[in-house]
Image (spheres, helix red, strand yellow):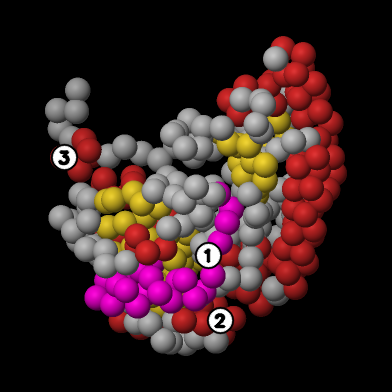
Amino acid sequence: MQTYWSSMAKRATPYVPGEQMNEKYVLKLNTNENPYPPSQAVIRAITEAANTDLRRYPSPDPEQLRELIGKTYDLTKDQVFIGNGSDEVLAFSFMAFFEPGETIRFPEITYSFYPVYAQLFAIPYEPIPMQADLSLDIERFFHSEGGVIFPNPNAPTSMAIRIEEIRKILEQNPTRVVIVDEAYVDFSTKSAVSLINEYSNLLIVQTTSKSRSLAGLRVGYALGNEDLIQALIQIKDSINSYTLDRLAIAGATASFFDSLTTKDNIKKIIQTRTWVSEKMKAYGFQVLPSETNFIFVTHPKVSARQLYAQLKQRQVLVRYFNQPTISQYLRITIGTDKEMEQFFKRLDQVIKSCHRLG
Ligand code: PMP
């Protein structure tokens, strides 16, 4: 076995995504998808792009979309890189900015794709322990040998650090790139985009998968200094000229033309998050202060693993992480109000049966 595998293929330990059960009756609150559909304008643009032009390659450089995303954040097109989902943008960023043999740092509790990329690209890493309340220990990210990456807000903890703290991390790593993964930032107020023109070592990665309801389209992007963007283009063009297909370019362009639907959906999700958090507390859960489209919760009396299993039996999927520090927590995606009411009906049964058992 593995006779013909390269050392890279051998050392790879792939990321395991959340279960995808697409049966209609399953309440799927485990992969932080947006419960609301993208706008009709997006669907129309994709449908219109599904024409005979598909025989032609897409543009290797979707300039119009780069320009449009740039405009959205008061940046130029040369400060924008677009890729096939932010996972791809992150992978390219590891290749472009981190060096094999130089230790990078990321939080101990964070997006589990980071150690996967580090291992694949032979980049050593130091997981930085969390503070007691699971927030980031800022000073431990200072003076990193190889660079820094963290999500803000963090996943799965749902909590964000302030822009002033990001500024400190940037200033204390002047010769290294600091990547801020803002996959969930639209559900928060703490984007570091305003720091891009001030710090040439800041790379921000965002996605259309969460706030823009386009996880199925696979469009993510990086924002940063022109020189950083050029490095990402260099890597991409050495691997695949056409990472974005015609339908993805059309759909993402329509999404950035019409941000109203997105803004509306974000508002609804934040409102739902507020009442859901309060109701979870009434059930005795501790709920970390969320700035994302999910909550991270723990119950002092009921085991998280047991809760996860019992919810699953009742066709509710949430995310359980079998790892130290957070093995007593569950990550629950915020759905529509109606979905969350159903969630509470089933949770109520589970809690009652757990108490009976306990
Ligand atoms: N970063 C974080 C923190 C995430 O949780 C996710 C989604 N799993 C991603 C990046 C990747 O998102 P996508 O590839 O869909 O853009």
The quadrant of the picture occupied by the N terminus is: top left
Q: Nearer the viewer, residue 134 or 323?
A: 134
Q: Real-space Cα distance between discs 3 and 1?
A: 40 Å
Q: Which mark is residue 84?
A: none
Q: Secondary structure at mark 2?
A: loop
Q: Nearer the viewer, mark 3 or mark 1?
A: 1
Residue topped by disc 3: 6
Image quadrant in which you'd find residue 249: bottom right
Decide: is 153 above or below 350: below
Image quadrant in which you'd find residue 49: bottom right
Q: Real-space Cα distance between discs 2 and 3?
A: 41 Å
- Is 330 magenta? The answer is no
- Chain part drawn in magenta: 157-179
Residue topped by disc 1: 161
Q: Real-space Cα distance between discs 1 and 2?
A: 20 Å
In the drawing, does residue 172 fall left or right of residue 305? left
Q: Which mark is residue 73?
A: 2
Q: Secondary structure at mark 1?
A: loop
Specify whether tag 2 is near ligand 1 (CB below 8 Å).
no
Q: Position of residue 225 (x, y in %)?
A: 37, 82
Q: Nearer the viewer, residue 194 or 47?
A: 194
Report whether residue 77 is seen. Answer: no
Looking at the image, which residue is at 75% across and 23% down?
350
* Earlier-in-chain disc, 3 versus 1: 3
Image quadrant in which you'd find residue 177: bottom left
Q: Nearer the viewer, residue 3 or 288?
A: 288
- The amino acid at mark 2 is Tyr
In the drawing, does residue 263 fall left or right of residue 61? right
* Earlier-in-chain disc, 1 versus 2: 2
Q: Nearer the viewer, mark 2 or mark 3?
A: 2
The quadrant of the picture occupied by the C terminus is: top right
- The amino acid at mark 1 is Ile
